[in-house]
Image: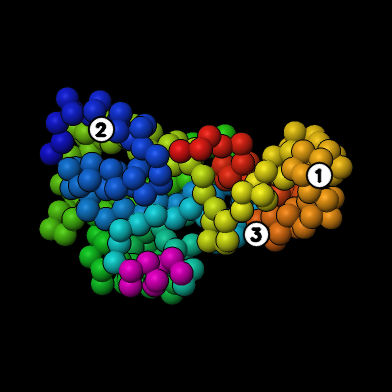
């Protein structure tokens, strides 16, 4: 079990981390101290009234679960029927996976039963989920903390009574840090020229202004902006500036 006196140095390392992978590796190690050996984190800024999560290409998803589990749970779309995923969409804060047991005790749809069977096959039996508070109706982030095999939900709930507050604080800090990092999604990343052109558009410059500043022709600037729109999967340059800004791809400090 973790020593609370070691939290400050750990949180300092998280704050000083310079990449998503570095943050994630630190978090995996810290959560293992509490008995959570498998984590799955997801965050989107692009929810719509038609979709709960927006395009899968725009979701930041991190996990150290078995790749076969991720394939069956995430890539197949089965996750959208998971009891704790549905809970996270409608709530904020931490929740015990005891809720899954309550769901299992009631009437299950065929898809819900498939989720529970998959979890049992991969020993995903006990844990906690945390649904983060985001300040946009289009954003949603959550993390599932799966207990290592052999730990029961009763044991995890007892541990949470003692350490739940600090675990929640750590996860919220990690969430805030992750969402502050550049994230290019699964599409191709913006090139330096595409980023620069979008930044000048964001600053209110005209096409001719941007061409003069960048030492290019207006046609070449438009080419960079067109390719940026394609990379970001948007229709307009204004949407490209907004999306690149949300993903921290422009106006960033070089590391």
Q: Position of residue 230 (x, y in %)?
A: 70, 61
Residue linked to disc 3: 231
Residue 9 painted magenta: no
Residue 186, relative to residue 4: is it above or below? Answer: below
Secondary structure at numbered mark 1? helix
Residue under numbered circle 2: 10
Where residue 12 sits, quadrant-wise, is top left
Q: 52 or 39, which lies in front?
A: 39
Eye-nearest disc, 2 or 1: 1
Q: Nearer the viewer, residue 24 or 212?
A: 212
Looking at the rendered image, the quarter that the N terminus falls into is: top left
Mark seen at residue 211: 1
Relative placement, left or right, of 92 versus 235 is: left
In this view, 215 is above or below 114? above
C-alpha gap between disc 2 and disc 1: 46 Å
Identify the image's colour scheme: rainbow, by chain, secondary structure or one colour. rainbow
Residue name at image x 48 percent, y 41 percent: 181
Across and down, in percent, residue 22 comes to 34, 45
Secondary structure at badge 3 equals helix
Considering the whole magenta stretch, tell me its main secondary structure. Answer: helix
Q: Earlier in the sequence, mark 2 or mark 3?
A: 2
Image location (x, y in percent) of residue 129: 35, 47
Compared to residue 104, the image places residue 40 above or below, namely: above
- Residue 234 visible in the current orientation: no
Magenta span: 67-75
Q: Along the line of sight, which residue is nearer the eye, 187 or 71?
A: 187
Few, some or many residues within 10 Å of mark 2 (<14, 14–19, 20+): some
Q: Earlier in the sequence, mark 2 or mark 1?
A: 2
Residue displayed at 29% across by 66% down: 66
Residue 151 falls in which quadrant of the image? bottom left
Q: Nearer the viewer, mark 1 or mark 3?
A: 1
**Residue 216 visible (yes or no):** yes
């Amino acid at each position: 079990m973790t020593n609370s006196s070691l939290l400050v140095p750990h949180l300092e390392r998280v704050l000083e981390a310079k990449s998503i992978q570095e943050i994630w590796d630190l978090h995996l190690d810290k959560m293992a101290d509490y008995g959570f050996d498998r984590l799955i984190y997801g965050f989107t800024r692009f929810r719509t009234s038609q979709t709960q999560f927006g395009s899968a290409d725009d979701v930041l998803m991190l996990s150290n679960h078995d790749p076969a589990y991720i394939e069956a749970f995430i890539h197949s779309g089965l996750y959208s029927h998971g009891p704790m995923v549905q809970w996270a969409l409608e709530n904020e804060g931490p929740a015990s996976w005891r809720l899954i047991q309550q769901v299992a005790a009631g009437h299950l749809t065929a898809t819900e039963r498939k989720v529970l069977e998959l979890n049992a096959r991969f020993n995903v039996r006990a844990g906690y989920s945390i649904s983060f508070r985001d300040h946009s109706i289009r954003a949603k982030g959550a993390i599932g903390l799966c207990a290592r095999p052999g730990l029961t939900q009763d044991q995890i709930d007892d541990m949470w009574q003692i350490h739940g507050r600090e675990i929640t604080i750590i996860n919220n800090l990690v969430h805030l840090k992750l969402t502050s990092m550049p994230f290019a999604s699964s599409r191709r990343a913006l090139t330096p020229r595409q980023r620069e052109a979008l930044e000048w558009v964001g600053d209110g410059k005209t096409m001719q202004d941007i061409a003069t500043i960048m030492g290019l022709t207006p046609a070449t600037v438009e080419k960079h902006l067109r390719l940026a729109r394609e990379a970001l999967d948007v229709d307009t340059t204004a949407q490209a500036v907004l999306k690149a800004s949300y993903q921290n791809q422009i106006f960033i400090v070089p590391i």
